[in-house]
Amino acid sequence: MPSVATDASALPAPGLPADPPRGRRANPWLTLLAVAFGLFMVALDGSVVSIANPEIGRDLNASTADLQWVTNSYLLALAAALILGGKLGDRFGRRTFYLAGVAGFTLASVAIGLAGSIEGVIAFRAAQGFFGALLLPNTLGMLRAVFPPRKFGMAVGIWAMISSVSTALGPIVGGLLVEHVGWESVFYINAPIGVAALVFSALVLPQTRNAAAAHDRFDIGGVVLLAAGLLAVVFGVVKGDSWGWASAGTLGSIGAGVVVLVVFGLYETRRAAPLLPMRLFRSPALTIGTVITALNFFVLLGVIFFVMLYLQNVRGFSPVEAGVRTLPLSLASVVASPLGAALTGRFGPRFTMPLGMALQGAACFTMLSWSAESSYATMWPPFAALGLGVGMVMASSSDAIVGNAPVQDGGVAGGLQGTALQIGGALGTSVLVSLISSRVGATLTGELTSAGVPAAAAEGLGGAKDAVAMGVAPVTAGMPEQLRAAVTEGSRAAFMNGVHTSVLVAGTLCVVGALVSVAWVRGTPVADRA
């Protein structure tokens, strides 16, 4: 455990606890256990809501656009405020803002279940995102402050395991709650978790902050520029599928966001106390770790999204049955995160980061063999490889980003990682679903004709590409049985064409990520750090 300087005239060293912790507050493993509660709650919520959306729509008479905003309002608020949350924790106390985030997230979750209208659900989802942004970066910031370097890698491995497993468990937990309790329970479940997190954290967490920055002027201009840039980029990404990726709205939003972020970077280089110190990016390991974090969740969330469509809409499994079939992903994550942390500690992220990317690439390329009738024997190996790869990359990229940042910037580094994760996830679901939709539109008529649908009828069904891109065959009760079977067969073939295009792109990006990691990451093994 780091200690405060003994010179009475000196301020506490940057990043160390404001007061020397005693008793249970001096135990870094209790700190890890405390932040695990909040991390589990937020990560579970990120994937569990997708299962609840159909029921939310039916119960509250919500449109498809409304349901998109149930997800997007949370994503926008979270992405825009993550670095701010880390900076506030670094400056004013990570324990303080972690507890504020847990309390706010818990209250917003209960409010969603009580809202009674789709507008209320959307508004409180945005509040959830904001409080999640206060919580998440300070989990890693506190771990960076309380764990000695030689044990930090293992702590990050456990952190990554919790994040990966809770994300992968979302479909299973969500399916059980929605089927047997109601969609509101998906949010109410955060209440007992949040209360337990608050009580335990208040008892064991030490206060850590960057004491040297206590008298610096807060970077309000940086907050505004970063939030505006991230909002514009993420908004353009999430709307790209519905607006069209080449549309003026999509390109204008993303382009404007990039311009604002460039201005933000230039502005930060001229600040004495910047919101996001640009000097962090002098570390190649930190920079590449940020990119690989985004790519990691691009693949994970994008693949999980269309896998759930495949299992439920094409194969006909219930939400619970579909969730159970993805258990190999969760179980592999349990193994991969501590294993990845141990390997990172021994060999550095240059070894585990490309290994994780290679495993994800292998999972994606294996999915090229899937068809609408594939046996489960062809499904679980790529699920396991994906879970192993994601866990490996989570452990190594967390170490590369937070482990290579100065201790006093631990919260900001955690926010940087969280921002990359959210943007990568948004890109993954938007881009991969857009690829599926595009491929379905190009092949649907031909696949319907090949399956035996008359040419005129096949042309008429071409307008149903949006439904087919979700794995739903455009059949009606009045169709003759033979025509119904042909439409189902052709629609499923077109959907699988889209899936194959998406996994080919995702797998190729994984290969590129592995090569970039090998070429540019020069992180020091944890065991060799001072």
Image (cartoon, grey):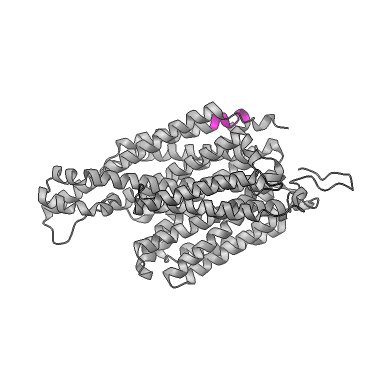
Q: Does the magenta stretch include residue 116?
A: no
Q: Which of 362 and 441 is in front in this view?
A: 441
Q: Can residue 38 be seen in this view?
A: no
Which residue is pictured at 52% across the width and 69% down the height? Answer: 111
State the image coordinates of residue 25 (x, y, percent, origin top left). Answer: 75, 52
Quarter of the rendering occupied by the N terminus: top right
Does 238 appear above or below 179? Answer: above
Task: Tell me where residue 386 sits by quadrant.
Answer: top left
Which residue is pictured at 19% across the width and 56% down the height? Answer: 475
Magenta segment's dominant SS is helix
Number of callouts in the render? 0
State the image coordinates of residue 234 (x, y, percent, origin top left). Answer: 47, 51
Magenta span of residues: 346-352
Q: Which of 84 and 525 is in front in this view?
A: 84
Quarter of the rendering occupied by the C terminus: top right
State the image coordinates of residue 113 (x, y, percent, origin top left). Answer: 48, 68
Relative to residue 398, is residue 208 drawn left or right?
A: right
Q: Can residue 274 be seen in this view?
A: yes
State the image coordinates of residue 39 (x, y, percent, origin top left). Answer: 57, 52
Q: Nearer the viewer, residue 252 or 54?
A: 252
Relative to residue 329, is residue 32 drawn left or right?
A: right
Q: Which of 280 and 112 is in front in this view?
A: 280
